[in-house]
Image (cartoon, grey):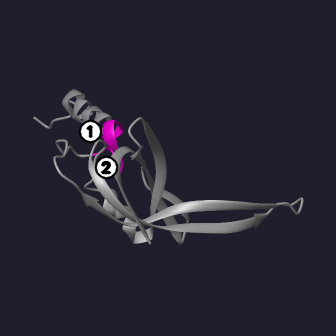
Amino acid sequence: MFKVSGTVKRISVEQIVSEKFRKREFVLTIPDGEKWVQDVQFEFVQNCCSFLDNIVEGMKVEVYFSLKGREWISPQNEKRYFNTLQAYAIKEQGDQPVRTTPNTQAHWSGLRGEMAQDHVDQGLNNMLEDDDLPF
């Protein structure tokens, strides 16, 4: 188990990979010495995907993770290896940016972000233009 601190650069929406597996990725900018930084991608899986619901881009966090690796054999019988940084906890640090509702939250209409607001606005416009009142 490992721990690293950095600034959240990007948070993706939840991906449903299969009926039994879902994941949510995020990128953490990590200082690497005085001059350099590294942008490193992590993922939460299954029920842990919701751990990112209260995190916003620009937030300083501490991430606890495991290093996962696997072998894959291609149809041409070539071996390849893949690594994943699978997070299992995330904790806020210090002064944080102002929280806003991220676009990853589902709207009551089932849509996300600006699409959801467009959907609501169009529905209101349709209601106002519809003049089939009985009186």
Indicate left or right for 68 with 86 as reference.
Answer: right
Residue that label 2 marks? 109
Left or right? Give the position of 21 relative to 8: right
- Relative to 116, is 129 on the left or the right? left
Farthest residue to the right: give it: 76
Q: What element carries label 2?
A: loop
Give the image location of residue 37, x and y in percent.
Answer: 43, 40
What's the residue type where badge 1 is placed? Val
Mark linked to residue 26: none
Seen from the viewer's position, the closer of residues 14 and 108 is 14
Which residue is at a point 18% across and 51% down the rendered structure image? 94
Q: Does the magenta stretch include residue 112?
A: yes
Q: Position of residue 100 (x, y in %)?
A: 20, 43
Report the side of 14 relative to 54 (left or right): right
Q: Residues within 10 Å of mark 2 (few under 14, many from 20)?
A: few
At x 14%, y 38%, the residue is 134
CB under 8 Å between callouts 1 and 2? yes
Given residues 36 and 69, the one toward you in this image is 36
Location of residue 72 with respect to 53 vertically, above or below: below
Q: In which quarter of the image is the N terminus?
A: bottom left
- The spot of residue 75 in percent (x, y) is 86, 61
Q: Name the residue nearer the viewer: 81 or 22.
A: 81
Secondary structure mostly seen in magenta is: loop
Numbered range of the magenta stretch = 102-116
- The residue under label 1 is 120
Categorize mark 1 by other alpha carbons within 10 Å: few (<14), some (14-19), many (20+): some
Does label 1 or label 2 sit earlier along the sequence?
Answer: 2
Q: Is residue 95 above or below residue 65?
A: above
Q: Which image quadrant: the C terminus?
A: top left
For the point 36% across and 60% down, the residue is 63
| Residue 106 in magenta stretch | yes
